[in-house]
Image: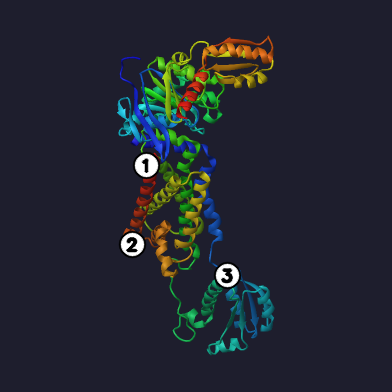
Amino acid sequence: MLRRTLAIALKELLQLRRDPRTAFTLLAMPVLLLFIYGYALSFDVQHIRLAVVDEDGSRAARDVTDAFLQSGYFDLVGYGHDARALDPMFASGAAQAAVVVPPRYGDDLAARRRPELQFVLDGSDSQTATTILAYARQIVASLSPEARTGGAEGAVVGLPIVWYNPDLASVRFLVPGLLAFIMMVTAVIATALAIVREKERGTMESLRATPLVAIELLAGKTLPYLLVSFVAASTSLLLAHLLFAVPVRGSLLWLALVMLLFLTVSLGWGIFISTLAETQQVAFQLGLLSSMLPTLLLSGFIFPISSMPAALQVITHIVPARYFLVALRAIVLKGAGPEVWWDQALGLVAYGTAVLGLATVRTVRSL
Amino acid sequence: MSAAAPVVLAEGLSRTFGAFVAVDRVSFAVSPGEIFGFLGSNGAGKTTTIRMLCGLLAPTGGSATVLGLDVGRQAAEIKRRIGYMSQRFSLYSDLTVEENLRFWGGAYGLFGTAVAARIEWALATAAIEAQRRTLVRELPGGFRQRLALVAALLHRPPIVFLDEPTGGVDPEARRRFWDLIDELAAAGTTAFVTTHYMDEAERCHRVALMHAGRLLALDSVPALKRTFPAGSVVEVSCRRPAAAMVAIERLAGIEEVALFGERLRVVLARPSAAGDLAELVREVDGDGAAVAPVDPSLEDVFIHVIARAEGRAA
């Protein structure tokens, strides 16, 4: 039993070595995707085009401008003394945000009359606008002398304390999801082709005539890819840690376990597709379709599951990446142990058993 | 036939797919060391029969044993003990000769020194030692076929099933392949071969003729040819064979006329029709035309047997 499984596994590895395209897809693609998406995919807003209208002209007014520029998020695109100049700038998109410093701002601030700064935002992209507003609030808060000196009255703004991701960098939230996405897609595609290839080339008929049984064939087909995908996933995680400062606060052992569980589910899903499809082309498309979109939309990768409609929340349970993501974020971001994510791991175990079981049944029928 | 227990024994073996009868109550026995040919056109039921015998397809009627094991109930045991070379390409073209052999050995549970010794045997037997590190995709067709055969023999099966093994290779490569089968049979391996090539069937010890799922005849090649009375196959040489052919086809007592180059091959329903034929040929073609008796070929037998069976059916 073990020998025959090993024979298949060795053969798969040899074939993988001779097939640079598949080897590349499995090993380099995850890293490449992480690199590209990691930089492109960010909800953080930078280089906000800021216009300043200074109707006061005092030193305090200039402090406002400086504070915005020193935050690092804003680029000054216009400076003037008349608010009417803002209209064309917003219409053309030359400015995304503007600060209007009212007359007598400096005097009012010195006299603690709580002067009001007007903040103008282009709200056509609400997501970006919300982020800019949050930045602006922090900056404005830092302007009042009380905030700086820690005084308890006047213009003090209560600053929220954010855990795990103090600067709320979206990359830390997104990269684990990205990892799950990349692992799912590459693993599914790799194995989706594994059995259908034998069918297409005609070698399946000869395998059928050997004493090989379904479990040996499936195990022999899955194990090499599990090894290769695990290496690719670990490399990606390391890269995410180095490039995007994604912390790994939890135990590496638990992390490896959860990753292996998730990879087994993904590979099992691919194998299952492979037993359904008759041609490599169909297998590839089924694999891509069934792994990419659900993982992208329904796993909580980008859109939080808790803010989905109830019906959709139920559907997310059929997306394996959903379980993995909760566990992965808990482990890397919060350093949580199994007492927090055991149910997610159990979900993965159940999922893997189901898909591999289905694949075995399908293979037994065709063997 | 030898007194030893048959390696393959089929009794009323049948397989239907819905309303279609692929194999219809076929019975035969194959002796140890025999080269047993299954001759028939595409769709005759050859592959279905071989797949049932290899435990790949369950029979829907009758029974069969291979090495004394029942094909319906002991398929797993049969798979362990037989060799099978499928009609479709059974090697991995992106692996080398040696890697393929190692894999197929492993699929039968052979590992380590056991498989190493058998790989050497296989390379020597198939005369492909020099190509051991060549990728199979770079191997000529004839080499691949020999490799596929020895790959099916690594676990020393007493019988090997070959399903149309020589499709798409040249005659010289086919001849070498059959020399190899002869060698193996001489060493005691039984070979069960399906084919639709007459020259291959001629090299079998016994040939079963399959048509439309039924076994129409089964005997050695010389015995099959003797089913024709002497003188019932003649060759006609004449100047205008095409015109002569049209005339001959109208003559009574003619079973079959075929044009081979400048000659006509005529199968007579009875040898006495030869005189009428000679007269007719001289009439349409002139006195130079000649009619001479020839030995019947296996193809003549095949066509004759099918025609007779279909005549009976109609």
Residue B34 visible in the current orientation: yes
Q: Which x, y percent locates residue B37?
A: 44, 22
- Whether callout 2 and callout 1 share a subunit is answered yes
Residue annotated with mark 1: A364
Q: Chain of mark 2?
A: A
Residue B132 visible in the current orientation: no
Choose top left, top right, bottom left or bottom right for residue B217. Answer: top left
* Residues at circles 1 and 3 in contact by the CB criterion of under 8 Å: no
Left or right for A342, reference A106: left
Q: Is residue A174 above or below residue A59?
A: above
Residue annotated with mark 2: A340
Left or right for A28, reference B8: right
User: Label 3: how many residues lie within 10 Å, few (<14), some (14-19) or many (20+)?
Assistant: some
Q: Amino acid at mark 1?
A: Val
Please identify the quadrant where the N terminus of chain A is shown: top left
Residue at 63%, 88% in the rendered image: A103
Q: Is residue B16 above or below residue B161?
A: below
